[in-house]
Amino acid sequence: MYKSIYVHIPFCKMICTYCDFKREINSDENIEKYIDKIILEINEVKHILKTIYIGGGTPNILNDKLLDKFLNSLNKNIDKNTEVTIELNPELITKSQLLILKSNNVNRISLGVQSTNNNILKELGRLHTIEIVNDKIALLKKYNFENISCDFIYNLPNMKLSDVDDMLLFIKKNDIKHLSFYSLEIKEGSRLNKLKYKIDNEKEEEFLFYFQNKINLNRYEISNWSKNENYESKHNKAYWNMEGWKGIGYGACGFDDNTYTESKGKTSDWKYTYEKISIEELYKDILIMGLRQVRGINLNEEKNSQAFEFYKNSIPKNLIIIENNYLRVKEIDLLNEVLLNII
Ligand code: SF4
């Protein structure tokens, strides 16, 4: 039985150039109807959860009343150990919103910062500036939110190594405990793809190398860093360890009992489709997801050791290591090479 849920709020004020998530600009009336529908689905979840992740889109596009009603529906699934994360767009954070998050047990914030360079933010179509982000982080701390994660993208158009330095300074100054640092990808539905923007792969490596040598946080996954184990994302670890989660809402995916769930349709009407996978596919996914983590996968778990046994001969021995019964990639930057052999 799943112990995590992901709830998708697929609405935004503006569409960013790099984005191809399931999201759209819609009226307040339709957003309210959407929330009412997902509350009905949440009401069917009766047990206490280990993690809840509210992502988007822009979850804090909801007005205070609607946000409170929505979060309230999740309270029956939360106890003192539940990690409850919400993605926030910095420019939309208000004091009253933070009070609502607090009173509804939200204890982890994921901020979409993306860059510290205001010109780049503008080009991306983001509605915040770095000054706004700094102010909103101060406000979050004032309201006792200290488990804050920031998302950044590297290898963006016109980005320089000095932007990485600024980002590192921002992290230090604001004492950010968790960081997701993603390389720009040109996805099919994005505006950058329509503009035929081409990624410079050499620069991508240069940015990562530069960042990795200077960052003062621990890398625990291919794109994630944290101050210590306490600040690692429990929710994402449920994905990487294939622990089972339910996706709720248009654009949400799930996995449980060897079955993937996808939601198809539109924000006013969506249906879930289910695909049961074979044991071989499960083993492959266990390795693909688990090896993204720097500490690797726990071979004490039966399904993990079976997955390794199944694919053992496909993975070159010089790329992997087993330590304390954890299987991991020797150098995490070699992950793609290992995955290519598995696939
Ligand atoms: S990146 Fe986030 S804020 Fe921008 S359009 Fe996509 S979902 Fe919306």
Image (cartoon, rainbow, N blue to C red):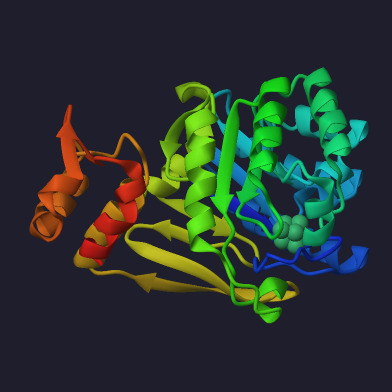
Relative to 149, is 34 on the left or the right?
right
Q: Is residue 23 above or below residue 208?
A: below
Tell how many labels.
Answer: 0
Q: Quadrant of the C terminus?
A: bottom left
Indicate the position of residue 56 as horizontal and vertical percent values: 69, 56
Residue at image point 58% right, 28% down: 79
Indicate the position of residue 313 as horizontal and vertical percent values: 8, 58
Relative to 63, is 326 on the left or the right?
left
Indicate the position of residue 232 as horizontal and vertical percent values: 50, 31
Relative to 295, is 224 on the left or the right?
right
Q: Camera-side residue: 151 or 130?
A: 130
Q: Is residue 269 above or below residue 157?
A: below
Relative to 118, is 342 on the left or the right?
left
Q: Camera-side residue: 43 or 229?
A: 229
User: Is residue 125 something one can see in this rendering?
Assistant: no
- Ligand 1's quadrant is bottom right
Q: Camera-side residue: 315 or 94?
A: 315
Indicate the position of residue 332 as horizontal and vertical percent values: 34, 43
Residue at image point 61% right, 50% down: 154
Q: Quadrant of residue 211?
A: top right
User: Is residue 209 something one can see in this rendering?
Assistant: yes
Q: Is residue 122 above or below residue 21?
A: above
Residue at image point 58% right, 62% down: 252
